[in-house]
Image (spheres, rainbow, N blue to C red):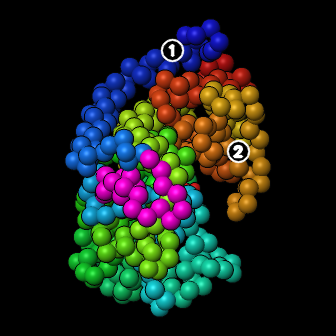
Amino acid sequence: MHPDFLLHPRLQALAAESCAALAPCFSLMEETTEYNQQKVLAAFLRNKVSETHFAGSTGYGYGDRGREVLETVFADVFGAESALVRHTFTCGTHTLAAALFGLLRPGEKMLCATGTPYDTLHPVIGLRGRGIGSLRDFGIGYRQVELDAQGRLDLPAIAEAVRRETPKLVYFQRSRGYTLRPSLSAAELGEAAAAVKSAVPETIVVADNCYGEFVEREEPTQRGVDLVAGSLIKNPGGGLARNGGYIAGRRDLVELCAHRMTAPGLGGEVGATLGLNRDLFMGLFHAPHVVGEALKTATFAAALFEKLGFSVSPQPFETRHDVVQAVRLGSAEALTAFCKGMQAGAPVDAFVSPEPWDMPGYDSKVVMAAGTFTMGASIELSADAPLRAPYAAWMQGGLNFHSAKMGVLLAAQSMLEGGHLPCIQ
Ligand SMILES: *Cc1c(COP(=O)(O)O)cnc(C)c1O
C-alpha cells in the first residue's frame, strides 16, 4: 500500500479476503461490462460518429448534427426508436417531470406501481402541500400500488388497479432509491409491462431508469417498457457529462416529451449544444466501464461491511439491478464517522469534514460524503445518510474501483478510529 494510507492491518486483511471471495462475482460483472461496451461501440460504429459531431452549435441550435447523432446513438443503445439527450435537462427530476407532463393531459391519471416514488418526484406529482405547478395542479390524478411484503412488484394488484383506474400511464421506479427494497431487473419490468398491457393494452409504461443503466445487458426498453428516463450525472454520463438527462423510447412518446421540453411546435429540433457534445459522446462511451467499476465498489463495500458485522443490502453475492448499496451502521455517530472517512478518500475536497444538517424536504438531519469532480454526481463515489432508523448509509458510484475501494476502506478506518468497529478493537 502507498505509505500515505495507513490502514489498520486487520482492515487490509479483510479487504483482501473480500476481494478474493468476490472474484467470481467480479468476473461476471466484467462479462456484462464487456457486452455493454460492445453494445455502445456498435452503436457508435453504426451511426458513424465522427469528430465533426463534437462541434457545438449556438443560438437555436437548428440542424445540430452532433446532437442528432448522439440521440440516435442513445436510442440504439437503449433499443428504442428515439431519444432526447440534453444538457438543458437540469437533473433527473427535471427530465422525469418533462416526460410526465409531456405524456399526461388534464383529467388523466398516473399510476405508480412501485409504491411511494423517489422523494424529489413528490412535488412533481403534487403528493403533498399546495403542489403549485404539479401534475395535480393541472388536474392529473395519481394512484399508487404498494410493493408486496418482500418489496417486490405485486403483479395481480397492478393489473387490477389498471383495470379499475384505467390510468393513461403506469410508472415504475427501477432503483431502490433510499429504501431497503430490491431494485428491479429489466426482465421484471418487462413482465410487469406485459401485465399492464394485458389489462388495458393502450396504457403507457414508463420507468425511472436512474442508477440502472448498463447494470444488465438489457435496458427496460428492450423488454417492452415504452419509455425510460434518467440523469446524465449518474450511469449513462460515464462521469464525464457535467449535467443533463435523457429520455428514450417509442417515437410518438419521445416526441410528446420533446414538445414539453422546449415548446409546442419546436420539440427536439432546437437546443444548442454549446460544445458539450464531445463530453456526452465520450461519457456514453465510458459508461459501461464506469458502471462496472461502481458495481465492483458497491459489492466490495457489501462484503467488507458484512465481515465487519453490519447488515448490508443488497448482499455481496446478490444479483444487482442498480448501483446503490445500503449499509446499516446502527447509530448516528457511526454514520457520521463513515461519511467523514469516505470524504477523506475523495479526489476532490478530501480535506473538508461532512457534518449532519437539516436539509430542506427531510424530517431528520442528513450527512453526506461527496468529493466529486461534478457537483452532486452520484456516479462518482458518494454516500447519503439520513440520521434516523435504520441508520443506514446509501452509497453509490466510483469512477474507478481502485480509488473508490480506498474511499470505502477509509470509511471503515474512520469508524474504527471512532470506536464503531467493535469486531476489530
Ligand atoms: C437520482 C434519482 C432521481 C432524480 O434525481 P435528481 O437528483 O433530480 O437527478 C429520480 N429517481 C431516482 C430513483 C433516482 O435515483
Choose top left, top right, bottom left or bottom right for residue 285.
top left
Measured along the vertical axis of the image, is residue 211 above or below residue 316? below
Q: Amino acid at mark 2?
A: Val
Q: Secondary structure at mark 1?
A: helix
* Residue 341 visible in image: no
* Residue 256 visible in image: yes
Foreground pick, 419 / 199: 199
Q: Residue at x 49, y 34 (%)?
A: 399
Q: Residue at x 57, y 14 (%)?
A: 10
Which residue matches tag 1? Answer: 13
Which residue matches tag 2? Answer: 367
Residue 378: assigned label: none
Percent coordinates x, y for residue 168 in the rendering: 38, 82
Q: Residue at x 57, y 59 (%)?
A: 90
Q: Say which of marks 1 and 2 sits in front.
A: 2
Q: Residue at x 44, y 18 (%)?
A: 17
Magenta part of the protein: which range?
55-75
Q: Would you call the spot at circle 1 few (<14 residues within 10 Å), some (14-19), or many (20 or more)?
A: few
How far, Cα to Cα, is label 1 from label 2?
29 Å
Choose top left, top right, bottom left or bottom right for residue 411.
top right
Answer whether labels 1 and 2 touch (C-beta < 8 Å): no
Measured along the vertical axis of the image, is residue 155 above or below residue 288? below
Foreground pick, 106 / 186: 106
Image quadrant occupied by the C terminus: top right
Say left or right for 10 vs 389: left
Q: Amino acid at mark 1?
A: Ala
Q: Is residue 69 magenta?
A: yes
